[in-house]
Image (cartoon, rainbow, N blue to C red):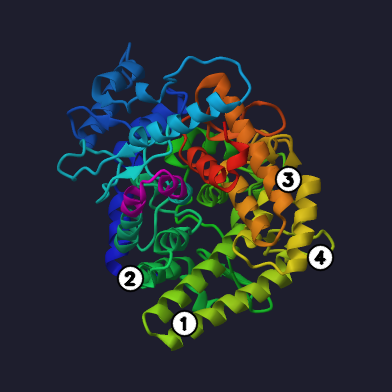
């Protein structure tokens, strides 16, 4: 649970989101689709006049003959910058196969990209007026494209690549930033924007700590306060929950087992996708708009925004029910967090506290095996906890327990067989086997899911399958770079082309793709050697 000071900090941030600051002006800009991407205006800043004055001027002028909303915004707002030229291809692009020269160029390109994706801290005094950006104490790496701020779970994978490329210092800066966010808000927001503070993302902070701690338990023990604060955020309300009920991120099943779900403290349209969320809710007259918006926001917290995973009807986003699901990946991460706290307490000399968290992790593992493992299907699933029915849908999230070492050898072998049969494609792993309009479904593949699958399979001795996924994915990245000179946030793993779907065009940059590529290249150097 957040302290009073942390709760007050969250309230202060939410008071300066664009919808709160600009009211009718914000709604009209978004609903009239003045910009193709709703995030553009969410990240805009006023040129001179304060938000309250702009709002009152707008209300007074908008009904006048000849009034132009576009002209008003152009006069009074500074739009966020476009993609820097430095991220554009620096080499002549030729349609060649990924042989030695292309692979070498790709490696040089990734190393050259990191400085272009770094953002340096600004004090509140130098931040533009009414900027939604949240200041951070140290430099950080953004994904690229429309993603102009740091993102929580992206950053773990980015840190992998930074360390591979000799930038441990920058990875440590990012860890310091996330610890500072936990200290300030009690959790790591989705990203460092005011409109992201009402939710988090998959809890990867403990993995960041482990990545940098290595054989230095003192670093792990030094982050114990932050690890415990984040755990308190995800477990807030657990002690008072009756069986069959939920509160915020935590739920108690009918048998008393505690699991977690994704959640957002707001039930309004996301400000970075305001029009899209309004339109989605309009398609579900049988539900309250607030219920739809809450589940859309919770889906955004998952990082899988959006996927058929979260929908009662896989082909209809308006049936999204994220808060009614106990996801396998989130609950696996929570075991990892509990074990990390146990290890940190042990390193700090607290044997009793360590045993307590080991017991919590053990109980959660029993609940995962009881409720999120399907022996008949041979893989892990999500649980629709309201109905008590496990889902039968296969997704790449089923590999997360393997990545974290939570599966038995038999479960790991069965999962590998199921994933090979249901998700392996020409260019790596599908996110799900369902073809929908959502970007976290087929035919798309995503770098972090490839990395966790490869590492999980290697952990359980499935080396040949791990190599197959890695080399197919690396080839897809190499082919794409040979064609365009860019690295993308997602790829079509069925055909040789960029990934698609979702609410915005596929972005280039791109933090976690760069990072996972160089990390895989270390594991499989013969696959990328000239």
| Residue at mark 3 | 313
Q: Is residue 235 left or right of residue 132?
A: right
Quadrant the N terminus occupies: bottom left
Label 2: how many Cα within 10 Å (few below 14, some 14–19, many 20+): some
168 magenta-colored? yes
Depth order, front residue of 62/348: 348
Please, is residue 209 above or below residue 298 in the view?
below
Gap in angstroms between the C-alphas marked 3 and 1: 43 Å
Gap in angstroms between the C-alphas marked 1 and 4: 32 Å
Q: Position of residue 228 (x, y in %)?
A: 40, 71
| Residue at mark 2 | 222
Q: Main secondary structure of the magenta part?
A: helix
88 magenta-colored? no
Element type at marker 3?
Answer: loop
Total residue callouts: 4
Q: Position of residue 245 (x, y in %)?
A: 60, 71
Mark positioned earlier in the residue sequence (2 or 1):
2
Please, is residue 61 above or below residue 336 in the view?
above
| Residue at mark 4 | 375
| Residue at mark 1 | 354
């Amino acid at each position: 649970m957040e302290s009073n000071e942390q709760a007050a900090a969250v309230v202060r941030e939410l008071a300066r989101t664009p919808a709160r600051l600009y009211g009718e002006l914000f709604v009209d800009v978004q609903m009239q689709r003045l910009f193709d991407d709703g995030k553009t205006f969410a990240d805009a800043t006023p040129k001179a006049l304060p938000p309250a004055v702009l709002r009152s001027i707008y209300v007074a002028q908008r009904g006048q003959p000849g009034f132009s909303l576009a002209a008003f915004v152009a006069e009074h707002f500074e739009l966020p910058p476009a993609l820097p030229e430095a991220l554009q291809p620096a080499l002549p692009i030729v349609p060649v196969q990924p042989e030695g020269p292309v692979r070498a160029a790709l490696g040089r390109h990734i190393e050259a990209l990191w400085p272009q994706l770094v953002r340096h801290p600004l004090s509140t005094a130098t931040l533009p007026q009414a900027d939604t950006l949240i200041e951070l104490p140290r430099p950080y790496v953004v994904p690229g494209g429309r993603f102009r701020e740091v993102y929580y779970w992206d950053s773990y994978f980015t840190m992998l690549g930074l360390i591979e490329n000799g930038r441990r210092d920058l990875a440590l800066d990012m860890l310091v930033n996330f610890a500072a966010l936990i200290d300030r808000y009690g959790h790591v927001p989705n990203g460092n924007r005011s409109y992201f503070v009402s939710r988090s993302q998959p809890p990867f902070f403990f993995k960041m700590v482990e990545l940098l701690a290595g054989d230095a338990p003192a670093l792990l023990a030094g982050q114990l306060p932050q690890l415990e604060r984040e755990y308190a955020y995800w477990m807030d309300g657990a002690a008072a929950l009756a069986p069959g009920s939920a509160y915020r991120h935590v739920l108690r099943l009918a048998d008393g087992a505690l699991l977690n779900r994704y959640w957002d403290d707001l039930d309004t349209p996301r400000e970075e996708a305001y029009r899209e969320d309004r339109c989605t809710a309009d398609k579900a007259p049988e539900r309250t708009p607030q219920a739809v918006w809450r589940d859309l926001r919770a889906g955004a917290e998952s990082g899988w925004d959006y996927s058929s995973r979260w929908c009662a009807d896989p082909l209809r986003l308006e049936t999204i029910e994220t808060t009614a699901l106990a996801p396998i990946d989130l609950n696996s991460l929570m075991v990892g967090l509990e074990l990390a706290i146990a290890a940190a307490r042990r390193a700090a000399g607290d044997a009793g506290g360590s045993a307590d968290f080991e017991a919590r992790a053990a109980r959660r593992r029993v609940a995962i095996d009881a409720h999120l493992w399907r022996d008949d299907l041979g893989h892990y699933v999500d649980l629709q906890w309201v109905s008590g029915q496990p889902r039968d849908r296969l997704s790449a999230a089923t590999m997360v327990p393997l990545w974290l070492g939570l599966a038995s050898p038999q479960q790991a072998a069965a999962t590998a067989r199921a994933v090979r049969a249901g998700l392996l494609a020409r260019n790596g792993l599908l996110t799900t086997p369902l073809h929908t309009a959502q970007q976290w479904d087929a035919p798309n593949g995503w770098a972090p899911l490839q990395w966790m699958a490869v590492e999980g399979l290697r952990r359980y001795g499935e080396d040949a399958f791990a190599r197959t996924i890695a080399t197919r994915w690396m080839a897809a990245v190499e082919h794409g770079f040979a064609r365009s000179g860019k690295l993308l946030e997602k790829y079509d793993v069925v055909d040789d082309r960029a990934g698609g779907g979702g609410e915005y065009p596929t972005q280039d940059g791109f933090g976690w793709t760069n990072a996972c590529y160089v990390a895989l290249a270390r594991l499989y150097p013969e696959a990328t050697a000239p």
